[in-house]
Amino acid sequence: MRYPHFLALALALGGTGLVATSDTAAQTARAVRETAEASMTLTGKIDIGTDGHVTSFQLDHADKLPADLAAFVQRQVQAWQFRPAVENGTAVATQTPVTLRLLSQSSPDGAGDTVRVAGASFSKYDPDDTSRVTSSEIRSPTYPKTLAAMRAKGEVLLLLKVGRDGTVDDVVAEQVNLRVVGKESQMRQVRNEFARASVSTARSWTFRPPTTGKLKDAESWTVRIPVRYMMGERTPYGTWEAYIPGPRERAPWRTSQAGAEAAPDLLAAGGIYMADLDDGPRLLTPLGS
């Protein structure tokens, strides 16, 4: 889908930090900016029939979006095919919440920006679910002072190995995505500082292991926890903003990618998500098709 230049607007609004101070630095920052994308996060509910087809899709706050953009998202989701849910050997109709990420990138021919549905997450967190790892004591990381002074913003996706006693055996920053644009060395510095602050704090967290379900007797559990660094700001629903995804890191203790999220950077803040539990709806349609 083509749109006027949303990307330039998103970067102008969301990429105000990490200002380059020399001609060389400015050129490097421009190179990074040219690879950036504008991101919009949307939510809704999908009804899935017994054959795996989408029977209906309710996009939240559709009235806050341009009509043609809302219609585009509706068409995309309505055409999706899922693996049917099965209970006691029989396919059943289900409803699932969904978080979508739209990405917009400037087209080389200057005709506008190309918009696509680039991510979808169907995960939800229930703190009372005894079949999953839940929170016992989680203290939010402190915003690094140097990054706060730079007004740097971003998101860290943590991957933690939780032991039988509920303590953290190991932790890695799986991905650090930024909401600001600067030269490459600055971006690396910001990612590293966000990652260090998050990992350091996460090592002291404690959890309640599952007491029911198929994973209750496991030797350990791997969970994902998103950490947001947004200067206390909240992005209005349906707003385009700068989005610079970081590289994905693998956890050394994981030998399998079972249950890997299609879009782990869309997990809602404040939740704890089981990385090795594959019990949600499985989207079969390639995103963007």
Image (cartoon, rainbow, N blue to C red):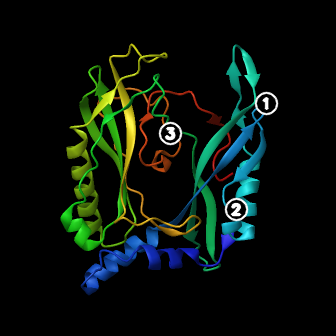
Mark positioned earlier in the residue sequence (1 or 3) = 1
Mark positioned earlier in the residue sequence (2 or 3) = 2
**Which residue type carries mark 3?**
Glu
> In the picture, residue 202 is in which quadrant?
top left
The reply to whether callout 1 and callout 3 are in contact (CB within 8 Å) is no
**Of the numbered discs in the image, which one, if any, rests on residue 62?**
2
CA separation in Å, label 1 and label 3: 23 Å
CA separation in Å, label 2 and label 3: 25 Å
CA separation in Å, label 1 and label 2: 27 Å
**Of the numbered discs in the image, which one, if any, rests on residue 252?**
none
- In the image, 110 versus 131, the foreground residue is 131
**Which residue type carries mark 1?**
Asp
Up the image or down, 10 lies above or below 57; here it is below
Q: In the visual, does 74 lie left or right of 227?
A: right
The reply to whether callout 1 and callout 2 are in contact (CB within 8 Å) is no
For image coordinates 28% across by 41% down, the residue present is 172
Residue 287, image x, y percentages: 63, 49
Up the image or down, 27 lies above or below 116; here it is below
Q: In the visual, does 155 lie left or right of 260?
A: left
For image coordinates 29% across by 49% down, the residue present is 140
Badge 3 local density, few (<14 within 10 Å), some, or many (20+)? many
**Of the numbered discs in the image, which one, if any, rests on residue 51?**
1
The reply to whether callout 2 and callout 3 are in contact (CB within 8 Å) is no
Q: In the visual, does 9 lie left or right of 167?
A: right
Residue 106, image x, y percentages: 56, 73
